[in-house]
Image (cartoon, grey):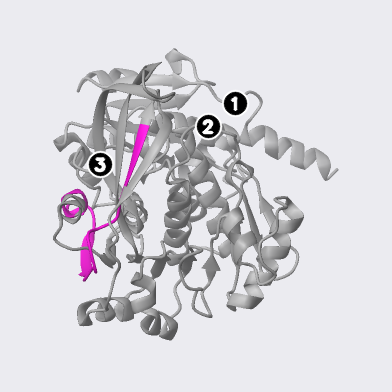
């Protein structure tokens, strides 16, 4: 077991397709762009994308969704097979497909086809939902949540991602995650043309009461999310604004939040991590930039760093490791780890034990014990696994892990990296990445101490 709770996703699966090319001219018979030399790529969509993203987090995922035997359904089954256990429901027609035409990575048009809806629940699906330790409902308004509503009502889900064409969440759902436009339209007082924080807060509070949900988090795009328990809301801002492809950001938010709730996180903690994950997701290019499902096998061993590294290497991927104490995790740490994850196909964080930190930093350190530091690191979307070492430096751990890339913060000099020579033994590379200027756990503690005098 990797320490991450299994997750059952109940919802409407789609097949997404991107047709991407270049557009340098308009058609002679109409003022529309001509997309030349386009390539085609398919990926899971709808609830299938949510399930796929949760599985890429190293989680055991089961998807209950309408999937038939048409060509789109067969392609979706192929894409999901290495990652997700599929429990299919019968469809009334072909699986819905959404095809985007893009030029220079910008959407030009969208083509939809397939009217299939989940038409009935099977005994197997009911059994899976009843036995699930944690359930996420990804409702795209195509029947899956409706045919299983009685089972879901008997054991309310951790998270419900609603759709205007779908039914309401069942009472008792722990967290409902409508987008801003959806929240304004679904609120009992109806749609409002206003799209500001006050309107979102009123809608969220009204929906908590109307849906009898424990909490509602309205996703606000680049502004983050607004979390309401029915009264004064909590605004969770995004750490950065990205102008890339936002396709799939809501699914990334839902998969992260539901996974953390399943692991025992508080609702506020889950929403904060989900905002960060969705922000990073958009910054990395959105759903269109996801690795192909068949490119690297799923890290089924999850938080077992050595098994994960072996699987990535077997698939000819790149294993990245980064090290540090990570006491009082700050923006410099997060920026470093996000940049490190972008260098390869997985990121293993090597963290000093409490005894190791104490020897390096002195009495009173660490401020946060190892278990807390590991939990915070694992909650970051950019971290795939965490390994702990008790020595002053991680050479012994690295010799076992054998990463392709070893990353340290830019406050080190090349001469301070004894690991560099070790990496050369197996063809690895040690690199320095810059910290955000002025960020330091030690300086934070010094400032805190000065404030108490």
Residue occupied by mark 2: 335
Residue 325 position in % (x across, y down): 50, 39
Where is residue 359? Give x, y as percent. 51, 38
Q: CA distance from mark 1 to mark 2?
A: 7 Å
Q: Which residues are magenta?
A: 77-101
Q: What element does badge 3 sit on?
A: strand
Say which of marks 3 and 1 sits in front.
3
Q: Are marks 3 and 1 in contact (CB under 8 Å)?
A: no
Residue 42, disc = 3
Q: Name above or below for residue 319 compared with residue 173.
A: above
Q: Residue 122: percent from the left, percent from the top?
A: 22, 79
Q: Is 326 on the left or on the right of 400, as rendered?
A: right
Q: Is residue 275 left or right of residue 285?
A: right
- Residue identifier under label 1: 436
Label 1 neighbourhood size at 10 Å, few (<14), some (14-19), many (20+)? some
Instruction: Please tell me how crowded label 3 is: few (under 14), some (14-19), or many (20+) other residues with Cα within 10 Å.
Output: many
Is disc 2 placed on a helix, strand or loop? helix
Q: Quadrant of the C terminus?
A: top right
Q: Quadrant of residue 201?
A: bottom right
Q: Residue at x 53, y 42 (%)?
A: 358
Who is closer to the viewer here, 223 or 330? 223
* Mark in front: 2 vs 3: 3
């Amino acid at each position: 077991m990797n320490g991450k709770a299994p997750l059952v996703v109940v919802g409407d699966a789609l097949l997404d397709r991107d047709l991407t090319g270049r557009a340098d001219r308009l058609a002679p018979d109409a003022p529309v762009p001509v997309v030349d030399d386009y390539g085609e790529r398919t990926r899971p969509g709808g609830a299938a994308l949510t399930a796929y993203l949760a599985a890429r987090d190293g989680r055991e995922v089961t998807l209950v969704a309408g999937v038939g035997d048409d060509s789109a359904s067969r392609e979706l089954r192929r894409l999901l097979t290495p990652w997700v256990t599929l429990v299919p429901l019968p469809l009334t027609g072909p699986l819905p497909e959404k095809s985007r035409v893009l030029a220079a990575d910008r959407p030009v048009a969208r083509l939809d086809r397939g009217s299939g809806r989940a038409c009935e629940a099977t005994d197997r699906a009911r059994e899976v939902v009843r036995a699930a330790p944690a359930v996420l409902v990804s409702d795209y308004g195509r029947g899956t949540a409706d045919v299983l509503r009685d089972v879901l009502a008997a054991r309310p889900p951790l998270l419900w991602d609603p759709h205007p064409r779908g039914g309401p969440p069942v009472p008792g759902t722990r967290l409902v995650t409508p987008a801003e436009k959806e929240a304004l339209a679904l609120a009992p007082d109806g749609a409002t043309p206003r799209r500001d924080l006050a309107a979102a807060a009123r809608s969220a509070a009204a929906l908590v009461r109307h849906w009898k949900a424990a909490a509602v988090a309205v996703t606000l795009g680049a502004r983050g999310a607004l979390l309401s328990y029915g009264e004064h809301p909590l605004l969770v801002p995004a750490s950065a604004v990205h102008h890339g492809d936002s396709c799939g950001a809501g699914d990334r938010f839902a998969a992260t939040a539901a996974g953390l709730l399943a692991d025992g996180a508080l609702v506020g903690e889950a929403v904060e991590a989900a905002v960060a994950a969705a922000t990073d997701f958009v910054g990395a290019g959105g759903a269109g930039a996801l690795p192909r499902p068949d490119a690297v096998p799923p890290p089924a061993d999850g938080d077992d760093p050595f098994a994960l590294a072996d699987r990535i290497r077997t698939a000819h991927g790149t294993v990245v490791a980064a090290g540090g104490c990570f006491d009082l995790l700050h923006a410099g740490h997060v920026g470093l780890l996000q940049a490190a994850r972008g260098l390869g196909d997985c990121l293993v964080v090597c963290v000093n034990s409490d005894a190791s930190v104490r020897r390096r930093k002195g009495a009173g350190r660490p401020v946060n014990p190892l278990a807390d530091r590991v939990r915070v690191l694992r909650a970051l979307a950019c971290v795939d696994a965490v390994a702990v070492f008790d020595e002053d430096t991680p050479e012994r751990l690295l010799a076992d892990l054998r990463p392709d890339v070893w990353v340290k913060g830019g406050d080190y000099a090349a001469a301070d990296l004894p690991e560099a020579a070790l990496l050369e033994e197996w063809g690895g590379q040690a690199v320095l990445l810059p910290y955000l200027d002025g960020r330091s756990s030690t300086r934070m503690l010094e400032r805190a101490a000065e404030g108490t005098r």
